[in-house]
Image (cartoon, rainbow, N blue to C red):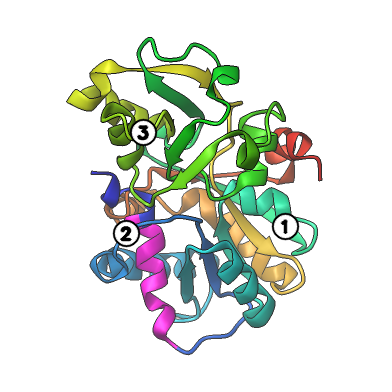
Amino acid sequence: MLRRIFTASLFAGLMGLGAMAWAGPRDFVICLPLGEGSAAAANRYIKPFLRLMEKKAGWPKGSVTGRYITGIAACKAYVRTHKPGFGLLSQGLYVANRRAWHLKVIGRVDMPRGAGRRLYLVVKKGAYSSLDQLKGKTLKSNHVAETSFLSKVIFRGKVNAARFFRLRSTSSPLMGFKSVHRGRADCTLVNDDELAIMKRRREGKDLEIIYKSPRLPQTPVVAFGRNASKADIAALRKALPSLCFGDGKSVCQNAMIRRFKSAGDGTYRSIVRLFGR
């Protein structure tokens, strides 16, 4: 089920267009460390979405293309080399690079079931009762790629995640809690959507939450301030909240998006403060 949500539809599908030759101030880059999903399978969902975006923003048909990148180093290299105008970035990449990339938040994505509003540290029932008890233990999750964000924001600066845990990454949103259930990991991190799925599965019957992250403001839609024009930024900012209504409703539903919300830099002030940059 999760493979149809967000990364497997919107992001992977959008980036399935990455084989095209493209370089322009309206191009999108999607950077999701440890992202998952088949671009080929999702591509059919996103082509109508891109055409809808162009229509709502008043841009020529075919003027928006994109690239889906899951590696942090690869994303940074791509931004440096290709200079995209817009993007959807992980919250970790946003807070770490907002100044260097001159990022301006122009919206955020609201998905069904609220995936990503918090992260929850999950262990086997009765095994541990606090974060402190997990020093040196194995944390396996699809949310551990960005260790600075993990340390400063998710764990509020209480631990240096890379040193405190034995981190094991996976691109599967289900593998973390399955590994804890099977005794192959001591703990995992799951978001709201993954937590709901975990509770419905047999693997979740013997698992419990011992820590909750601060509330997270959802995945940001950003403009690269030195690449995108002021007119294009204003046009897309205005268009985003209306994309999933009217003739765009079915397009967004097929891409597993409820809607785009208005947002600005201030929406992310709480996590920027925690990150310290």
Sequence-wise, the earlier of marks 2 and 1 is 2
Q: Which residues are magenta?
A: 8-20
Residue at the disc numbered 1: 97
Give the quadrant of residue 215. top right
User: Crowding at label 1, few (<14), some or many (≥20) Cα neighbours within 10 Å?
Assistant: few
Q: Amino acid at mark 1?
A: Asn
User: Crowding at label 2, few (<14), some or many (≥20) Cα neighbours within 10 Å?
Assistant: many
Residue at the far front in the pictured view: 136
> Which residue is painted at 26% across and 30% down in the image?
182
Residue at the disc numbered 3: 193
Sequence-wise, the earlier of marks 1 and 3 is 1
Residue at the disc numbered 2: 37
230 shown above or below 198 = below
SS class of the residue under badge 1? helix
Residue situated in front as seen by the camera: 264 or 127: 127
Sequence-wise, the earlier of marks 2 and 3 is 2
* Magenta span dominant secondary structure: helix
